[in-house]
Image (cartoon, grey):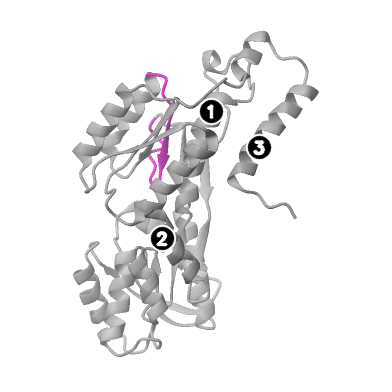
Amino acid sequence: MIRTTARNVVSLLFIAGMLLTACAPAAPAATQAAAAAPASTANEEYIYVSSMGNLEFFNAHKYGWNWAGQVLGVKATYVGPAENDVPAQVAAFDQAIAKNPAGICVFAYDPSVVPDIDKATAAGIPVVTILGDFPNSKRLAYVGSDQHLLGFVGGTHLAQSLNGTGKVAILTLPGTTMFDDREAGFRDAFKNFPGIQVVQVGDTKADIATAVSVAKDILTRNPDLAAFVGTDSTAGMGAATAVKEAGLSGKVKTVAMDRNSDVLQAIKNGDLTGTVAQDDAAMAFWAMLVLYEYKHNQAPLTVDNAKAGAQSGPNTVFTSANYIDQSNLQYFLDANSTYTK
């Protein structure tokens, strides 16, 4: 069995390129020159334009972006506001474009960044969206989670822990595409377990106090409720808090999203049953890898991809979804500590 690491990925890509060069018919001179490896990439800059950088969630992204820069031998820069400040993120994006970097990765959660995505692309700077996506923009690719898969993984594990039967409530943010997709994933997982019944959906408004209040109301209306599932960490923690205060910890199961330390600690304490983790550190790595390979190792789809307007390479990269419970949470908690160093 071959174990694939980040360094192995880069090495395998290089070896594959060498084999293709050796075995394939001779390419036009212009194509061969474009495919030649650069003498040095130490000053080649890739910029991650984010927002909400103060959230623990993004520690793994910062770590993964920096790790990618080390693996590829390039300069990795992370910019953007610490808070949820869309104008500040757009300003950071403008500044990134002005630096004419080799590529830009952007946390695409608000459509205000779309003009800058198109502006950068027009200037010859490839842009990868991460976590969220605007497929109608001129972005090169999306790298991140399949939102439906996140819900499906969580729903499958919950249903199995309930032995395939029980009443379940969903806490979410109705009307938001990302969370609607996760809810659909939960529901599709439950279809494989006819004994699972979704009895109510609650709107948390992305506020922990509201999530607790809504969860308590659902418990009152459904005294035989078997479990809550949440489409984000706020929903999961709100459900866990309501269940704990009702003296039902362990009796009413609760599944959250993401691997924040407070979420993992709640699992450790027995207040949360489990959570679904996005492949966050690797997500940032693959975002940079897509940009790097686009610049240095495009397959010769034509004799001149740029002039032909032909794009070679992936336009969607879905990263893994992992379920965390008491059996494996310590590994994730320890990684959270590593990400802050």
Earlier sequence position, callout 3 versus callout 2: 3
The amino acid at mark 2 is Asn
- State the residue at coordinates (45%, 64%): 334
Over which residues does the magenta segment extend? 123-137
The amino acid at mark 3 is Ser
The secondary structure that most of the magenta stretch takes on is loop
Q: Of 163 and 207, which appears nearest the observer? A: 207
Q: Image height check: is 67 above or below 44?
A: below
- What is the spatial separation of the Cα atoms under label 3 and label 2, in whole angstroms? 28 Å
State the image coordinates of residue 233 (x, y, percent, origin top left). 34, 65
Queried whether the magenta region covers residue 129, the answer comes back as: yes
Earlier sequence position, callout 3 versus callout 1: 3
Earlier sequence position, callout 1 versus callout 2: 1
Question: Seen in the image, is 205 located left or right of residue 172?
Answer: left
Q: Are the two marked residues, 3 and 1, in contact with CB atoms closer than 8 angstroms?
A: no
Q: Image height check: is 130 above or below 180?
A: above
- What is the spatial separation of the Cα atoms under label 3 and label 1, in whole angstroms? 16 Å
The amino acid at mark 1 is Tyr
Task: Report which quarter residue 16 is drawn in.
Answer: top right
Q: Name the element at disc 2.
A: helix
State the image coordinates of residue 94 (x, y, percent, origin top left). 27, 27
Residue under circle 2? 336
Residue under circle 1? 294
- What is the spatial separation of the Cα atoms under label 1 and label 2, in whole angstroms? 31 Å
**Residue 218 is at least partly visible in this image:** no
Quadrant (top left, top right, bottom left, bottom right) of the N terminus: bottom right
- State the residue at coordinates (55%, 36%): 314
Q: Residue 11 carries which label?
A: 3
Q: Image height check: is 240 above or below 116?
A: below
Between label 1 and label 2, give the one nearer the viewer: 2
- State the residue at coordinates (36%, 86%): 249
